[in-house]
Amino acid sequence: MVTSVGQSQTEAFRSLVSSENYGKCKNDVHRFWSFTYTNLQPKMAASVWLVLGIAMVRFYIQKGTHRGLFRSVQRTLKFFQTFALLEVNFKHYSRIFMVWFIAHSIKQIQNEESVILFLVVWTVTEITRYSFYTFNLLNHLPYFIKWARYNFFIILYPAGVAGELLTIYAALPYVKKTGMFSLRLPNKYNVSFDYYYFLIIVMFSYVPLFPQLYFHMLRQRRRVLHGEVIVEKDD
């Protein structure tokens, strides 16, 4: 009797872990994760960026200067911007680079006005963007939110790029002086890497990349706000 029960339990377990059932379970987990991330992530993101924005305003009111502002919000900024790796998006990768490999690594430039510029731009942009996603999911999108989503970027995107480029430019002398993140010859790997010239290449990479993103948003703006049918040309 005991043997029979044990065999039935074993067969049930094998059935549970069979490839077919495992595949169904895996798909269910994937669907659950996708649903949870799609529905909760915009709300969480909008809240975090709103908190970050309030913290920045509060700091400036209390201190009367932007000096030290990055240091006061950097933990929240680093955590959430790194978490944004879950979104496969060039914009987030470039921001993570700015946060960790520029502003975090080169403390001498943290009080530059250009750092505050891109921080303010990121905050306003993300509050607007994630508010748009949140209200859209709720099927109750106020016109102002939609209008802000497709108009604020006209000024914010160029301002953000200017802030990022000016910050990288300000970092160049420190990188050249210290040789940080660089690998000189001779070495056992027989490979050289100069972070200074890498940053210059990064700055030039904005030239082809930024117009693509910017004009894409302009096309989206015409489609959403003015109802234009956009026909993409074949390459």
Image: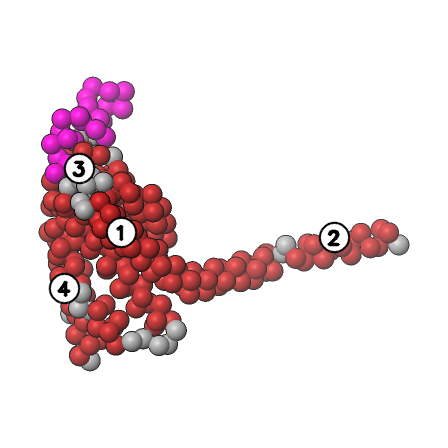
Of labels 2 and 3, earlier in sequence is 2
Relative to 212, 49 lies left or right = right
Q: Spatial distance from mark 1 to mark 3, Cα to Cα?
A: 22 Å
Q: Which residue carries the number 3 mark?
A: 109
Residue 6 in the image, given as x and y percentages of width and height? 80, 52
Which kind of residue does numbered mark 3 sit on?
Ile
Viewer-proximal residue, 44 or 180?
Answer: 44
Vertical position of residue 54 compared to residue 174: above or below:
below
Query: Magenta part of the protein: which range?
Result: 170-192
Q: Residue furthest bottom?
A: 227
Residue 4, image x and y in percent? 84, 55
Residue 68: image location, x then y, percent:
23, 40
* Dot 4 amino acid type: Ile
> For numbered disc 3, what is the local secondary structure?
helix
Judging from the image, what secondary structure is the residue with disc 1 in? helix
Q: Residue flagged by tag 1: what amino acid is it?
A: Arg
Tag of residue 111: none
**In the rendered structure, which disc, 4 or 1, sits on the residue that comes first in sequence?**
1
The residue wearing badge 4 is 154
In the picture, which quadrant includes the C terminus?
A: bottom left
Q: Position of residue 166 (x, y in %)?
A: 11, 44
The residue pinned by badge 1 equals 58
Q: CA distance from mark 4 to mark 1?
A: 27 Å
Label of residue 10 in the image: 2
